[in-house]
Image (cartoon, rainbow, N blue to C red):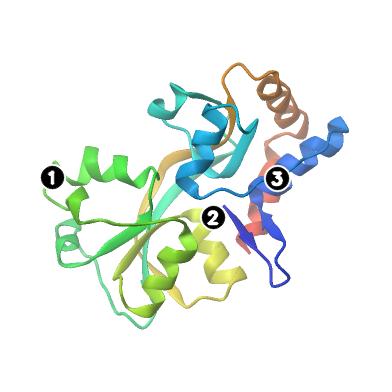
């Protein structure tokens, strides 16, 4: 997940990874910002060569774009503001709360394929937002009880942005994150080679540094 520093500069795990790759290959990275739901469409249509911002690897997305090897095994967090004392002892308690997240995220698949069939939560009740910034703003303003956010996003908002949020439920290791490429891109293969060159320990070190 990418976010902006106080001086407006983009930062994040994905950006550090791909910038390091570009430096090693002596290529220039030109960044165009998109809303979440437009980012993958830009790659699929050829408007962009690559996309990165905590993108989940899914079978549906693989039909229109290619992915790198996973660089992170991801978990999904349901979070609330720290002063909103929500306790989830069982997932069947979810129905009493409003849940939101950015549109186009893999949380919809989790709800549709797992939570909804068990009667825990309906996809039709979800509040959708353009990005995590709007999602978390509504959470802070009290217009949302719970937000679905992935693990790196949780630690970004909690540790980097100092937002007083708390995890109320965690879906552990349900997701994989990767870099998205347009179909047939030779850069995908080269990026995978770069990941192997770095090794899992170095990649994990980069990821862990952003979790602090």
Identify the residue position indicated by label 2 in the image: 152
Q: Is residue 62 above or below residue 170?
A: above
Residue found at x 68% / y 25%: 192
What quarter of the picture does the C terminus occupy? bottom right
Q: Give the residue displayed 39% in from the left and 44% down from the top.
A: 104
The residues tagged by marks 3 and 1 sit, at their Cα atoms, a distance apart of 42 Å
Q: For residue 196, what is the image quadrant?
A: top right
Q: Position of residue 55 (x, y in %)?
A: 51, 41
Q: Secondary structure at mark 1?
A: loop
Of marks 2 and 1, which one's residue comes earlier in the chain? 1
Q: Callout 3: few (<14), some (14-19), or many (20+) C-alpha neighbours within 10 Å?
A: few
Residue 71 locus on image (x, y percent): 60, 37
Q: Which residue is mark 1?
A: 118
Q: Is residue 50 left or right of residue 121?
A: right
Q: Which mark is residue 31?
A: 3
The mark nearer the N terminus, 3 or 1, is 3
Q: Position of residue 165 (x, y in %)?
A: 44, 73
* 8 on left or right of 118: right
* Mark 2 → mark 1, Cα distance in angstroms: 28 Å
Q: Which of these two is toward me, 121 or 203?
A: 121
Query: Element at badge 3?
Result: loop
**Residue contact at pointers 2 and 1, CB within 8 angstroms:** no
CA–CA distance between discs 2 and 3?
21 Å
């Amino acid at each position: 997940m990418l976010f902006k520093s106080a001086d407006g500069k983009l930062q994040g795990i994905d950006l550090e990874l791909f910038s390091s790759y570009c430096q090693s290959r002596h290529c220039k990275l030109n960044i165009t910002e998109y809303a979440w739901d437009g980012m993958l469409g830009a790659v699929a249509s050829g408007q962009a060569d690559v996309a990165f911002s905590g993108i989940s690897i899914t079978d549906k997305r693989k039909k229109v774009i290619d992915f790198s090897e996973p660089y992170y095994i991801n978990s999904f967090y349901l979070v609330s503001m720290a002063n909103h004392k929500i306790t989830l002892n069982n997932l069947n308690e979810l129905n009493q709360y409003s849940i939101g997240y950015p549109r186009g995220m893999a949380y919809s698949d989790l709800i549709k394929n797992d939570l909804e069939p068990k009667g825990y939560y309906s996809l039709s009740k979800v509040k959708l937002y353009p990005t995590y910034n709007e999602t978390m703003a509504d959470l802070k303003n009290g217009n949302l009880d719970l937000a679905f956010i992935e693990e790196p996003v949780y630690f970004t908002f909690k540790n980097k942005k100092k937002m007083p949020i708390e995890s109320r439920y965690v879906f552990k290791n349900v997701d994989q994150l990767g870099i998205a490429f347009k179909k047939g891109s030779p850069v995908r293969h080269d990026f995978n080679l770069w990941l192997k060159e770095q090794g899992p320990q170095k990649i994990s070190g980069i990821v862990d540094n952003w979790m602090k």
